[in-house]
Image (tube, rainbow, N blue to C red):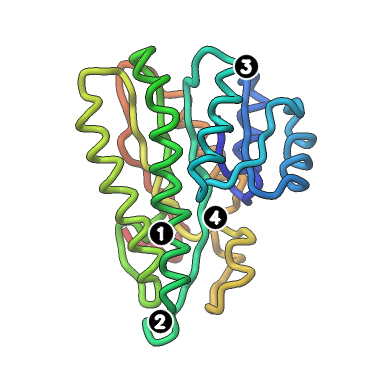
């Protein structure tokens, strides 16, 4: 199950997974974009679900619909997220709360909804994408870093709960990705030197193929010109 399939990285992951022969269930908030991704990736319409990750009822409903089609969710990839880059003198409370609601609380809703099924089979893989700002802070990224640091801490805690199972948890810390993420952010960046979304998707696909005897707890993928970690 891939959440956030309409984003730059998410849409590429959908194509990678589908072309490999995997049975992929995708979600996105924008139904029109979701239809386009499903069509381009060769994913049947009945495996594409409109979902608002910031709404717990929406998340639970979609997970139930997925489980109505398949007995087990083997892999959960959370490629959702929003970014608001503002300094503290311009960052308002509503923006701060919105970022946490999507990037952190939404991730909680998603994992909580899928985890019982994985516990039933005592195995599974959960991949989140905190980004490098989940490890290294940046000026103007108080809201974004707070959500991503929180995501990392939450998943590390959940991992401790799952030690007697074969449920694996992986965080991939991506650096700057050349995607629509930057379209509405007032920050000077060199997008031509960023990681191509397709290459980021290949890294996520690599994580999906790891043998069950081990786990890649973390992966870091950054542009050459901005290696913060």
Q: Residues within 10 Å of mark 1 (few under 14, many from 20)?
A: many
What is the C-alpha distance between the residues marked 1 and 2? 16 Å
Number of dots carrying numbers: 4
**Which of the labelled discs sits on residue 195, or is there none?**
4
Residue drawn at (62%, 45%), measured in percent from left and top? 198
**Which of the labelled discs sits on residue 100, or is there none?**
1
Q: Residues within 10 Å of mark 3 (few under 14, many from 20)?
A: few
Q: Disc 3 vs disc 4: which is toward the camera?
A: 3
Q: Which residue is situated farthest in the bottom direction here? A: 89
Secondary element under disc 1, as helix, strand or loop, is helix
Image spot of residue 29 (x, y percent): 64, 48
Residue drawn at (47%, 73%), measured in percent from left and top? 85
What is the C-alpha distance between the residues marked 1 and 3? 31 Å
**Which of the labelled discs sits on residue 54, or is there none?**
none
The part of the image, by quadrant, that contains residue 22 is top right
Q: Disc 4 vs disc 2: which is toward the camera?
A: 2
The part of the image, by quadrant, that contains residue 132 is bottom left
Q: Earlier in the sequence, mark 3 or mark 4?
A: 3
Q: Earlier in the sequence, mark 1 or mark 4?
A: 1
Location of mark 2 (residue): 87
Q: Residues within 10 Å of mark 2 (few under 14, many from 20)?
A: few
Q: Are marks 4 and 2 in contact (CB under 8 Å)?
A: no
Residue drawn at (73%, 28%), measured in percent from left and top? 43
Q: Residues within 10 Å of mark 4 (few under 14, many from 20)?
A: some
Location of mark 3 (residue): 69
With respect to residue 111, does 138 lie above or below? Answer: below
Quadrant where the C terminus lies? bottom left
Q: Disc 1 vs disc 2: which is toward the camera?
A: 1
The answer to which of 228 and 102 lies nearer the viewer is 102
Image spot of residue 199 (x, y percent): 57, 45
The answer to which of 208 and 67 lies nearer the viewer is 67
With respect to residue 193, does 29 lie above or below? Answer: above
């Amino acid at each position: 199950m891939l959440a956030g399939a309409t984003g730059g990285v998410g849409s590429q992951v959908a194509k990678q997974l589908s072309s490999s022969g995997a049975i992929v269930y995708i979600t996105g908030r924008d139904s029109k974009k979701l239809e386009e991704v499903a069509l381009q990736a060769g994913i049947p319409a009945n495996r594409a679900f409109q979902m608002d990750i910031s709404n717990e009822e929406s998340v639970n409903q979609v997970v139930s619909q997925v489980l109505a089609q398949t007995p087990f969710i083997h892999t959960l990839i959370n490629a959702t997220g929003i970014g608001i880059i503002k300094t503290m003198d311009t960052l308002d409370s509503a923006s701060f709360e919105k970022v946490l609601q999507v990037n952190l609380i939404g991730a909680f809703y998603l994992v909580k909804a899928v985890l019982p099924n994985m516990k039933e089979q005592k195995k599974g893989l959960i991949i989140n994408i905190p980004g490098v700002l989940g490890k290294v802070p940046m000026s103007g990224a108080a809201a974004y870093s707070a959500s991503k640091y929180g995501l990392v801490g939450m998943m590390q805690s959940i991992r401790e709960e799952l030690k007697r199972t074969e449920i694996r948890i992986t965080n991939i810390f991506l650096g700057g990705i050349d995607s629509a993420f930057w379209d509405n952010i007032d920050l000077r960046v060199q997008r031509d030197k960023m990681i191509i979304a397709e290459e980021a998707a290949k890294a996520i696909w690599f994580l999906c193929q790891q043998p069950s005897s081990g786990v890649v707890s973390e992966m870091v993928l950054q542009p050459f010109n901005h290696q913060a970690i």
